Image: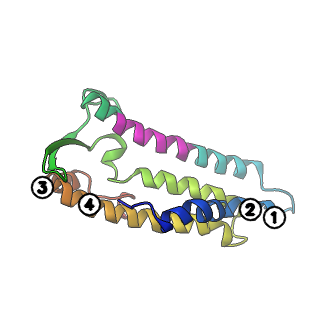
Amino acid sequence: MDRFGYYIAWGCIAFVPGFYTLPSLYLVKNSPRGGDGGFLHVALNLAILLLGLGSVVANYWVDLQRQLVRATDGACSIWGRRPRLIRAKYRDETGTERNSLLLASGFWSVGRHFNYLFELLAALCFGLPALAASPLPYLYFAFLTTLLVHRALRDEEKCSKKYGRYWDEYRKLVPYKIVPGIF
């Protein structure tokens, strides 16, 4: 959707390496301290680590479900069941009719962009060791939240135009974009 230009080049070369590492850079200079003046409690560190690792694994699992369905044309199992699919037709920019599978099973039955939730949880874990010491380690999480919510809204518009009535049907099966019951 976005063409390569100054915005993308500057973002990849300068913004991403600088801004995305802010939580780590902050924590290097500001080691978190527990109530007794020592490092954070081992259980809290372990909980943050497990949440972060679990989010990364879940993010890959979400994508794996979609890849499996596309690779097998839906002849597979998602969470122990045949996947619920919408076989959508659309026309590409040349006017050629194409087919696509819209997955409404597994993680993709929870939210149309549910993978973004796991990306956000992983990003949150980068700053969590700072607890409430400063908002600085949470700027990456705030930026990523804004970016992914905006991307979800753009994706919704793009998919609605691309798939038409099929996307309407999909939205009825999967009513939430990212967070069930909220958005």
Residue 103 placed where, x, y %?
A: 27, 42
Q: The residue tagged with tag 4: helix, strand or loop?
A: helix
Residue 163 placed where, x, y %?
A: 18, 53
Amino acid at pointer 2:
Leu
Residue at mark 3: 165
For residue 93, side relative to residue 182 (left or right): left
The reply to whether residue 157 is visible in this rendering is yes
Amino acid at pointer 1:
Lys
Residue at mark 4: 158
Residue at mark 1: 29
- Image quadrant holding the N terminus, namely bottom left
Q: Magenta span has 63?
A: yes
Sequence-earlier tag: 2 or 4: 2
**Label 2: few (<14), some or many (≥20) within 10 Å?**
some
Residue 160 picture quarter: bottom left
Sequence-earlier tag: 3 or 4: 4
Amino acid at pointer 3:
Arg
Mark pair 2, 3: CA separation:
47 Å
Residue 150 picture quarter: bottom left
Sequence-earlier tag: 1 or 3: 1
Residue 35 placed where, x, y %?
A: 81, 63
User: Of helix, strand and loop, which mostly describes the magenta segment?
Assistant: helix
- Image quadrant holding the C terminus, namely bottom left
- The residue segment tinted magenta is 54-67
Q: How is the image coloured?
A: rainbow
Depth check: give the residue in front, 151 or 31.
Answer: 151
